[in-house]
Image (tube, rainbow, N blue to C red):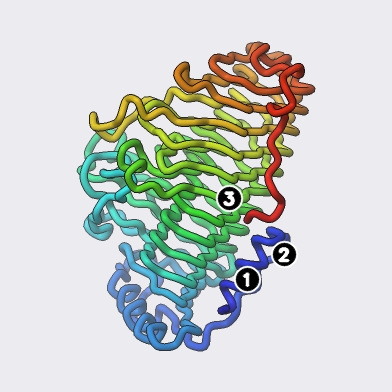
């Protein structure tokens, strides 16, 4: 068991408060060794690519791995690919700047669980920092920054000037044993941090920033991934702070890889256009065994948002959200089966998602619009939806919950919740408990 795998195993046993120890690599180099110039103007794509080519030749034979140091400076670059058994280390004051030239973000195939780019049909721009089919990778440092310089991308998207889906800032595909810690990620063109088809991912002590009006700048999107721990992060952005996904309609159903065993805790932030914590709406591979706790969101459109829809299929189940503070939130809790965005006309109109065993407890704060909506699907009503110890001040907006096609249980909910979630329901509808060691 190498040092990274051991560190990850320890983290998932307790989701440690302290920093996960990251061992030194036996080989290292600085980006300046490859001719890079950190003036914010010189394009260093070739330097980063050459550095990765050189270090990957070392890690191919020495599993102890190699480390690339990025010193203080502003290092302009296009996209580059990481390698296995590797650490990208950003020193204090180091800024990796994403080029604003789209040709520096090459086009790659769409993800098979999406069937097309998420934003537009066809392929998609690769992420700025990219890894695929890797193991044992760390991105860390002294709170250095990766800046996607997304403003032009956001403008092009709003004006309909793009031919392909915008790139993520950092993406890992089909990779295992990944740590991202003690870095700042800002101004992503699209979703910021996207582990997809990954296993054993630790995201800790990460700050994610983008303007509140920046489109689709999700913070962290675990997607068809398992054994994911996200903790001690601050996120302020233009879409969902954290969104758990698992593929889109018929493509996600066919790919069939769920997101499972996900623990999120001690996350703080705000987003005026998204949710503090979202599940979906792309849920077609299934989502299960999710624990969210100690979340604080301020001035946010939605607190908890669980979304799916006809055509998604699969399931959302075994979800617990607890100890959540929501201040100046438009809508505190939304669980809805009416997401209607599809990749194409090939979706299955009889692929009904199952939503069951969802517990929300220990939520406090105030709402500006309404406390919540729980809107099941008539053909497959939501089951075992349990809310308890919810205290929301709704004096500035509507006080009534809206509930349809849902069965479950409630206790100590203010404002009083709909009759479909009654304290008198049968014991098997009582709050679901997750085992304490599944992650």
Visible residue check, residue 97: no
Q: Nearer the viewer, residue 261 or 350?
A: 350
Q: Which residue is mark 2?
A: 18
Instruction: Identify the residue under disc 1.
Output: 7
Mark 1 crowdedness (10 Å alpha carbons): few <14, some 14-19, many ≥20: some
Q: CA distance from mark 2 to mark 1?
A: 12 Å
Position above or below: 136 against 252 = below
The reply to whether dot 3 and dot 2 touch (C-beta < 8 Å) is no
Where, by quadrant of the figure, is residue 115 drawn?
A: top left
Q: Secondary structure at mark 2?
A: loop
In the displayed structure, does residue 73 sit left or right of residue 168? right
- Residue appearing at x 49%, y 55% in the figure: 185
- Marks 1/3: CA distance? 17 Å
Residue at image coords 44%, 50%: 224
Q: Position of residue 205 (x, y in %)?
A: 62, 58
Residue shown at 42% from the left, 47% from the top: 191
Looking at marks 2 and 1 on the same chain, the residue that comes earlier in the sequence is marked by 1
Residue 80 left/right relative to 378: left
Per the rendering, the mark at residue 262 is 3
- Closer to us: mark 2 or mark 1? 1
Q: Is 433 positioned to the left or the right of 260 in the image?
A: right
Q: CA distance from mark 3 to mark 2?
A: 19 Å
Q: Secondary structure at mark 3?
A: strand
- Residues marked 2 and 1 touching at CB (< 8 Å): no
- Where is the C terminus found, in terms of image quarters? bottom right
């Amino acid at each position: 068991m190498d040092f990274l795998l051991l560190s990850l195993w320890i983290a998932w046993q307790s989701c440690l408060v302290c920093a996960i120890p990251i061992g030194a690599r036996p080989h290292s180099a600085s980006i300046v060794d490859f001719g890079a110039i950190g003036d914010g103007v010189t394009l260093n794509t070739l330097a980063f690519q050459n550095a990765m080519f050189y270090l990957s030749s070392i890690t191919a034979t020495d599993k102890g791995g190699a480390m690339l140091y990025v010193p203080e400076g502003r290092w302009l670059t296009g996209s580059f690919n990481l390698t296995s058994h590797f650490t990208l280390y950003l020193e204090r004051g180091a800024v990796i700047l994403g080029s604003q030239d789209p040709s520096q973000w090459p086009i790659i195939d769409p993800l098979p669980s999406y069937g097309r780019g998420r934003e537009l049909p066809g392929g998609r721009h690769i992420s700025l920092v990219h890894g695929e089919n890797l193991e044992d990778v760390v991105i860390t440092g002294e709170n250095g920054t990766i800046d996607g310089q997304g403003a032009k991308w956001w403008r092009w998207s709003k004006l309909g000037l793009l031919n392909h889906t915008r790139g993520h800032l950092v993406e890992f595909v089909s990779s295992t044993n990944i740590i991202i810690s003690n870095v700042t990620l800002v101004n992503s063109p699209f979703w910021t941090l996207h582990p997809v088809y990954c296993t054993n991912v630790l995201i800790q002590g990460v700050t994610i920033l983008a303007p509140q009006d920046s489109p689709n700048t999700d913070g962290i999107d675990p997607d068809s991934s398992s054994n994911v721990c996200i903790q001690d992060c601050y996120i302020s952005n233009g879409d969902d702070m954290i969104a758990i996904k698992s593929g889109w309609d018929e493509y996600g159903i066919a790919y069939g890889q769920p997101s499972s065993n996900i623990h999120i805790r001690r996350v703080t932030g705000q987003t005026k256009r998204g949710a503090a914590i979202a599940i979906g709406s792309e849920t077609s591979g299934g989502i299960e065994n999710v624990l969210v706790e100690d979340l604080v969101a301020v001035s946010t459109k939605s607190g908890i948002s669980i979304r799916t829809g006809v055509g998604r299929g699969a399931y959302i189940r075994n979800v617990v959200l607890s100890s959540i503070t929501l201040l100046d939130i438009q809508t505190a809790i939304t669980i809805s089966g009416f997401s209607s965005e599809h990749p194409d006309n090939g979706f299955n109109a009889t692929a009904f998602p199952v939503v069951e065993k969802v517990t929300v407890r220990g939520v406090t704060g105030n709402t500006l619009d309404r406390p919540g909506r729980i809107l099941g699907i008539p053909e497959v009503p939501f089951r075992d939806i349990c809310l308890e110890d919810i205290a929301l001040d709704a004096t500035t907006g509507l006080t009534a919950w809206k509930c349809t096609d849902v069965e479950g249980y409630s206790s100590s909910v203010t404002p009083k919740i709909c009759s479909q979630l009654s304290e008198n329901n049968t014991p098997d509808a009582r709050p679901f408990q997750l085992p304490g060691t599944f992650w």
